[in-house]
Image: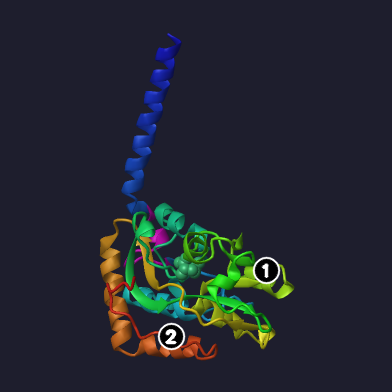
Amino acid sequence: MKLRKVTAAAAAALVLSLTATACGGDDSSNESDSGSSGGSSIKIGIKYDQPGLGLKEPNGDFSGFDVDVATYVAKELGYEPDQIEFVETKSADRENALARGDVKFIAATYSITPERQEKVDFAGPYLLAHQDLLVKADSDITEATDLNDKKLCSVTGSTSAQNVKDDFAPDAQLKENGTYSECIAALQSGAVDALTTDDSILAGFAAQEQYQGQFKLAGLKLSNENYGIGVKKGDTATVDKINAALEKMESDGAWDKAVKDNFGPANYKNEPAPKIGDIVS
Ligand code: GLU
């Protein structure tokens, strides 16, 4: 009898969860919140603490290459800049933010990887970066092999942290934080010996006025990071529209301008614009 009761409860729970799943799959009621063509606003995920890529300025303005790409793409989807609501999507939160429908798309130094493609869809790529190391100006770390037994900082949920464990410095003492700005603080204080992530991000930090002369990039191309624009899994209509927008951005010169405006001050030597669909492995 007891068993039957449990079974009935389990069956009821299953029905509830199936109903919830069905509702979640057909979420057209959420569309105007996260942004659909012709809606009143669009929510876009970016980083808030990565100078030159995605930064929330002290006065509340947003700047960076990802912000410019996102603003261009939003315009092509039918949204003016004042209809954009930027939302912070930290590295470890991106897949969930898309699955929940918190944002319509994410432009946040978001590398296209086979593991992530199981959970989200990507438009792009729109930039090719490479994993590198940032160390103190007087550090003698020059190679990935110098990292073993050293304290290394990176961010939870990033390809950078994963590559350290899988690949090039399995014996480093990896300290994972939620954001890169926390790693910069740890590097500055001497709590860690190096920070690893994409060279584009590291160059942006190193060029900040308050860090001038303090840090140097090792100049290693430890991986290929193909930045894509993440969308909810299955939203192929949005992927197609974003790909068309990215192609237009490259052909009308807006991509080059965004590169100069945002990477010029950091003296970051970017790779040429990638071809849509061409992922460098
Ligand atoms: N591009 C890498 C990634 O998607 C590192 C930068 C980041 O954490 O956003 O994980």
- 143 or 55: nearer the eye? 143
Q: Is residue 120 magenta?
A: no
Density class for disc 1 (Cα within 10 Å; few <14, some 14-19, many ≥20) is many
**Location of the C terminus (image quadrant):** bottom left
Residue beneath the point at 43% across and 68% down: 110
Count of labels shown?
A: 2
Residue 115 place in picture, x, y as percent? 38, 57
Side of 177 relative to 52 (left or right) = right
Q: Which element is circle 2 on?
A: loop
* Closer to viewer: mark 1 or mark 2: 1
Residue beneath the point at 36% across and 65% down: 39
Side of 191 relative to 43 (left or right) = right
Query: In this rendering, does residue 167 appear at all?
Result: yes
Q: Is residue 89 above or below residue 13?
A: below
**How far apart in space, not on screen, are marks 1 and 2 (Cα)?**
27 Å
Amino acid at the residue labelled 1: Val
Q: Is residue 31 magenta?
A: yes
Amino acid at the residue labelled 2: Asn
What residue sits right under mark 2 in the picture?
Answer: 270
Residue beneath the point at 28% across and 75% down: 276
Q: Is mark 1 within 8 Å of ligand 1?
A: no
Of marks 1 and 2, which one's residue comes earlier in the chain?
1
What residue sits right under mark 1 in the picture?
Answer: 192
Residue 10 place in picture, x, y as percent? 41, 24
The span picked out in magenta is: 30-42
Residue 173 place in picture, x, y as percent? 62, 61
Q: Which element is circle 1 on?
A: loop
